[in-house]
Image (cartoon, rainbow, N blue to C red):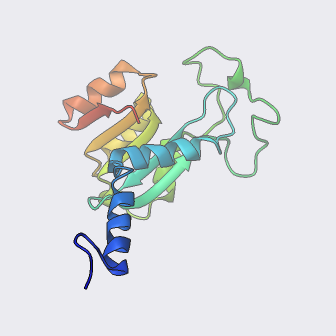
Amino acid sequence: MKPVGWVGPETAIAQAIQGACRIMPRPSLDSVMLGVAMCLAHRATCVKLSVGCVLTDKHGRMIGSGYNGVPRGMVHCTDCPCPGATAPAGADLCQGVHAEQNALLNCRDPEQIETCYNTHAPCLRCTKMLLNTSCKRIVYHEDKLEQPAKDLWLAAGRIWEQVHA
């Protein structure tokens, strides 16, 4: 005869697993994808700003990713800064390709893009490029914002959202 309240080993293991699962809540998809974008930003080769981008489809699957840096085969700005490294903002002397541009180049089908996750709010040029896709939502972390980019995106009836991961 088993004592009152006694549980077999199978039940004890199941309870332990359930207890362990409750310790850490499941992060949101936005948090996960922004985390991936932040991780990609560590690969950036620009000395001014490190940006990462992840493009997802309607199921939340990654279909494109990128980070900012000079075009393939060129000397990285981290090794020898380009003219844009010391130029004022808006001078357009940077030789780097933006993270969003690289992500679009790595995306097989831009018409499948649902959400663009960025470490930083996209610039006007990248926003215009994303407007020519099916992307409905931009989610970003850092608010280094070009207001005309946000205004254009919102004028198209799409979602522009800052999330603190």
**Quick one: which residue is furthest to the bottom in this view?**
1
What residue is shown at x 26% (from left), y 75% (from top)?
3
Query: Who's the residue at 32% across and 48% down the image?
Result: 28
Q: Is residue 112 visible?
A: yes
Q: For the point 74% across and 29% down, which residue is it?
A: 82
Which of the 4 quarters of the picture holds residue 44? top right
Residue at the outermost right position: 80
Q: Where's residue 121, x and y in %? A: 42, 30
In the figure, 113 relative to 118: above or below? below
Query: Can see residue 121?
Result: no
Residue 37 as seen in the image, left or right of residue 86:
left
Give the camera-side residue of 86 and 23: 23
Q: On the image, which quarter does residue 112 sit in? A: bottom left
Q: Is residue 60 above or below residue 83?
A: below
Pinpoint residue 74: horizontal percent, then vertical percent. Answer: 76, 45
Expressed as whole percent of the image width and height from the top left, the position of residue 61 reads: 36, 61
Where is residue 38 shown, x and y percent of the image? 53, 41
Q: Give the image quarter of residue 50.
A: top right
Q: Residue furthest left?
A: 157
The number of numbered badges drawn on the structure is 0
In the image, taking residue 100 as reference, residue 42 lies left or right, namely right
- Quadrant in which the C terminus is drawn: top left
> Which residue is more in the foreground, 82 or 4?
4
Give me the residue at 35% from left, 38% from top: 139
Quarter the N terminus occupies: bottom left
